[in-house]
Amino acid sequence: MTGLPATKFCAIEVPRLAEEALWQELELTPKPGLVDRLNNGAHHDMDHALFVRSITAIAPWLSRFTALGSDYADQPADEQLRLLRPMGIACEQAMYAATGGVNTHKGGIFALGLLCFAAGRVREVTASNLCREVGILCRGLVARELAGRSAAVTAGERQFQQLGLTGARGEAESGFATVRRVLPLWNGRQLHDLLLRLMAVNPDSNLVSRGGIHGLRYVQSYAQTLLANGWDRRRLLEMDRALIRRHLSPGGSADLLSVAWVLAKCG
């Protein structure tokens, strides 16, 4: 994988990278449709200060995910989600306590929690090893939690039944295939470029929830156009206004931006 200069990392450094990634994502400005230092994006219930509180609450849990992975590193990977899930829920509760019940980082906790847990299990921390381990950890997740449900209750279940979208579960089970597809195309310098590349191809369930399949296609097409024709701050601000008008927030791509940043660092 290409991107930021790679260094050899040990498992205990991955939680630090994950926290760094959350801060990098938050501070990136402008960020079309998303909370940043300029505005609240397409959100009425959250702002920059709320995200700061959320990251501060989440950060201590990241090293706990890695420690848990290390404790059970000798156990089969495809049996580990049942051990990881209670800790993930506890981390979510810490987030909700800090945000007054607002879901700021549930997707990020899921993705980065898996990466940190995987870091405790692999012999050598590389992007490829982490992605492979996450894929094994999540093997069968879509079949169990989406395809196996007769009645759709959650937004994710409805999107799977109606559109075949697998959301965050599918991305994790694939070993972050979308991120692995995008990282070699990134210039390794500008996070805006990386975010646009993710938005251009990611079947973002947040966008589908807010704007249906047409909202998803709109954002993908907009990002593809900027990448093809060139982008600058003015064009990003225009995109931000366009997404806010349509109440579209590419939160899934924001989560994958954090994942991509960690993987690019690990090399």
Image (tube, rainbow, N blue to C red):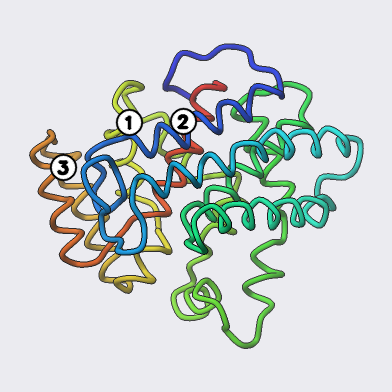
Asked if residue 253 lies left or right of residue 147, the reply is: left
Disc 2 and disc 1 in contact, CB within 8 angstroms: yes
Q: In which quarter of the image is the C terminus?
A: top right
In terms of image quadrants, where is residue 208? bottom left
Q: Where is residue 204 in the image (x, y as percent from the top left)?
A: 40, 59
**Which of disc 3 and disc 2 is earlier in sequence?**
3
Residue on which disc 1 sits: 191
What residue do we see at 62% from left, 37% from top? Answer: 131
Q: What residue type is labelled 1?
A: Leu
Q: Where is residue 230 in the image (x, y as percent from the top left)?
A: 12, 35
Q: Which amino acid does label 2 sit on?
A: Trp
Q: Quick one: label 2, few (<14), some, or many (20+) residues within 10 Å? A: many
Residue nearest the observer in this picture, 228 or 28: 28
- Asked which secondary structure carries label 2, the reply is helix
Disc 1 and disc 3 in contact, CB within 8 angstroms: no
- Asked which secondary structure carries label 1, the reply is helix
Q: Is residue 82 visible?
A: yes
Q: Which amino acid does label 3 sit on?
A: Leu
Q: Quick one: label 3, few (<14), some, or many (20+) residues within 10 Å? A: some
> What's the distance in space between the residues labelled 1 and 3, CA to CA?
13 Å
* Vertical comparison of 94 with 147: above or below: above
Residue on which disc 3 sits: 236
